[in-house]
Structures are given as C-alpha cells and as structure tokens.
Image: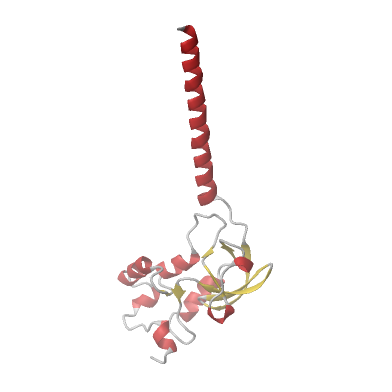
Amino acid sequence: MGAFKRWLFIVIVVVVVITCVLVAGLLFRTYNNENSLINNQAEILRVIDGDTIVVKQGGVYIIRLAGIDCPEKGQPGFLEAKNFIKSKKVVYTEKPLAETRRGRYNRVISFLRSNPWRNAREINRDMVALGFCWSYGKTFTREESLAKKLELGVHADRGAIHPKNWRKGAR
C-alpha cells in the first residue's frame, strides 16, 4: 500500500504542475496579446484633413483613417476634426505601415491608437464617439448613434450634410 500512495502522490503532483504551467501560459498569452506594447510608432508630419494624415514610420506614408468619414474642407466641423488629429504628435499602428493594405488612391488604410498599448482605444473610434465625424460603413455605428443622441459635434446640427453627399455637390 505504501508504493501505491507514493505513486498516487507523484501523479497528483505531476497533474498539479502541468495545470499550473498551462494556466500560466494562457495568462501570459492573454496578457501579451491584449496589453503588450505596439512598436509601430509613427510621427505625424502633416494633417491633410480629419481622416487623412501624412506620417513617418521608416518611410513616409499617407494614411486614410479606417472606418470614419470626416467633414470636407468648407464643411462645418472640418477644422475641429483636423485639429483633433493635429493635437496628436505621434500615433501607433497595429502593423508596420509597409505591411498594411492600401486602398483607393494608394493610401494606407489604418486604425490608429494614441498610445502604444494593444488594448488602448482607437483614435478613429474616439473621433466618431466625440462627434468629429461619421462612421464609414458600419464600423462605428454604435458610437455614431450615441454622438447623434447627445448631439455632439457634427451631429449638433440636425441638417448636417454627410461628407459623401457633400462631395456629390449637395450643399
């Protein structure tokens, strides 16, 4: 019976050690994915408008902020959106810009963060939530609905013209 107890003790210890290693690995991987630093810092060189900027990250890139549509030049809210982006000196991208997909007009399409943590809010999302712009497509519809309800920024004027219609000549 002594050998059986010793064998059972060893099996229990091995199971406990393996469980601890697995749990520690899951915790580390979760922490590493959600809270790790993003090393892709980009310096803002120029702000073209609220949703288009020129940055330096290795090379020079024109970025179209993904998921948002800001007021056009001459449209109410244009300067507010542009100045919001201009207030950021550096931004962080999920992937290096050299590896990021390009859209129409050969611009890099990207979500940006204002600090290097992976779980940080996106600048794009904040711009919609604060009423600086509209959601492009269905990307930030919840944030846009809330900004409309609170009548923030471009949504304070119920007759505000969406940039898509402004570009088509509706004024």
Relative to 154, is 58 on the left or the right?
Answer: right
Inspect this view and state whether residue 89 appears: no
Q: Is residue 149 left or right of residue 57?
A: left
x, y percent for residue 102: 56, 74
Find the residue positioned furthest to the right.
Answer: 58
List x then y, in percent, for residue 89: 60, 67
Question: What is the quadrant of the C terminus in the image?
Answer: bottom left
Instruction: Please report the residue visible at 31 percent of the width from the left and 80 percent of the height from the top.
Output: 158
Q: Number of marks in the image?
A: 0
Residue extending farthest to the top is 1
Q: Residue at x 38, y 91 (%)?
A: 170
Instruction: Work out whether residue 31 or residue 163 is closer to the camera in this orientation and state it.
Output: 31
In the rendered view, would you say 105 is above or below 27? below
Q: Residue 143's quadrant in the figure? A: bottom left
Which quadrant of the structure image shows residue 169? bottom left
Viewer-side residue, 128 vs 65 = 65
Residue 125 shown left or right of residue 110 in the figure? left
Q: Is residue 96 above or below residue 50?
A: above
Q: How is the image coloured?
A: secondary structure
Which quarter of the figure has residue 67? Answer: bottom left
User: Picture coordinates of residue 153 (x, y %)?
Assistant: 39, 74
Q: Residue at x 50, y 41 (%)?
A: 26
Q: Quadrant where the N terminus lies?
A: top left
In this rendering, the answer to whether 12 lies above or below 127 is above
Would residue 143 appear left or right of 83 to someone viewing this image? left
Q: Does residue 83 show up?
A: yes
Q: Position of residue 129 (x, y in %)?
A: 40, 67
